[in-house]
Image (spheres, rainbow, N blue to C red):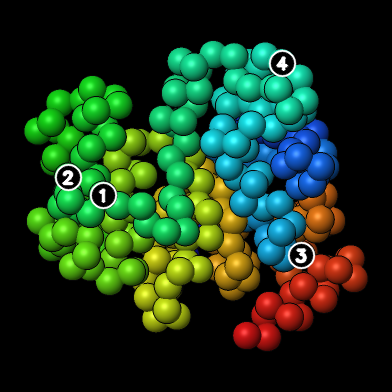
Amino acid sequence: MPAKRVQDRTEDTPVIEIRELHKAYGQLEVLKGVDVVAHRGDVVSLIGSSGSGKSTLLRCANLLEDSQSGEILFDGEPVKWRGTGHDRHPADGKQVLRIRTNLSMVFQQFNLWSHMTILQNVMEAPVTVLGRDKAEVAQAARGYLEKVGIGDKADAFPAQLSGGQQQRAAIARALAMEPAALLFDEPTSALDPELEQEVVRVIKDLAAEGRTMMIVTHDMRMARDVSDYVVFLHQGLIEEEGPPETLFGSPKSERLRQFLSSTMAH
């Protein structure tokens, strides 16, 4: 993989900035004051045990979940809220839509529309949400399908594709929105190991292009290989964070050491 460029951060407004985020489901506190920053061109991986809060954090960043307190900024623009605590919700629907269209999410389950071809799946949001020209979108969509290695599957339906191909179609669909950042929620965990590698290759290529990404993953090798920065969450708090060579090479906390010894052994 080509060396990632090191950016001058002095004038670099983060694409995503999360400050002191708290999230609870009823009495269960899932995030207990978390700060995460993704600068332009950064790949930030969120790792941790099941239930550590990493997927919840990603969903809060994309405003799919409401958080109870803390700030979320997109390109320096803070999300506007109304209400407090469990009654806190985004105050401006247009702002939410604008942010969501700039943060494309790739889910664990591919969420493709079964009644549409792969090409139609990739075209749907740019045409209906962004109102872009259909012919232009079709051309771009074919380009994104080529990029993820399934250009020959444009006219197939999701059920005719393997899981790895479906997930690559979902990545093409996310790219078609031309977002400022891509959010991946366990993009390989529903796949067999050999299909997983197809998806990992695509994510590595996107990282090499300098795309801004935030990735929740159980795949420690991928996190180590593609990330500029890794955040280890434990019980809703950041236990340790830093560049991958530090976290994977010389972890400071005993919890992270235990986590890595159990996950890297498989």
Please give the label number shown on residue 83: 4
Residue 34 in view of the camera: no
Disc 4 from disc 1: Cα separation: 35 Å
Q: Residue furthest front?
A: 26
Q: Looking at the picture, which amino acid does disc 1 mark?
A: Trp
- Label 2 vs 3, first from the N-terminus: 2
Above or below residue 84? Residue 232 is below
Helix, strand or loop at disc 4? Answer: loop
Q: Quadrant of residue 105?
A: top left
Kind of residue at badge 4: Gly
Q: Is residue 201 above or below residue 4?
A: below
Q: Is residue 170 above or below residue 226?
A: above
Q: Which residue is mark 3?
A: 247
Residue type at mark 3 is Leu
Residue 113: mark in rendering: 1
Q: Does the CB distance between marks 1 and 2 fall below 8 Å?
A: yes
> x, y percentage for residue 217?
58, 62
Quarter of the rendering containing residue 139:
top left
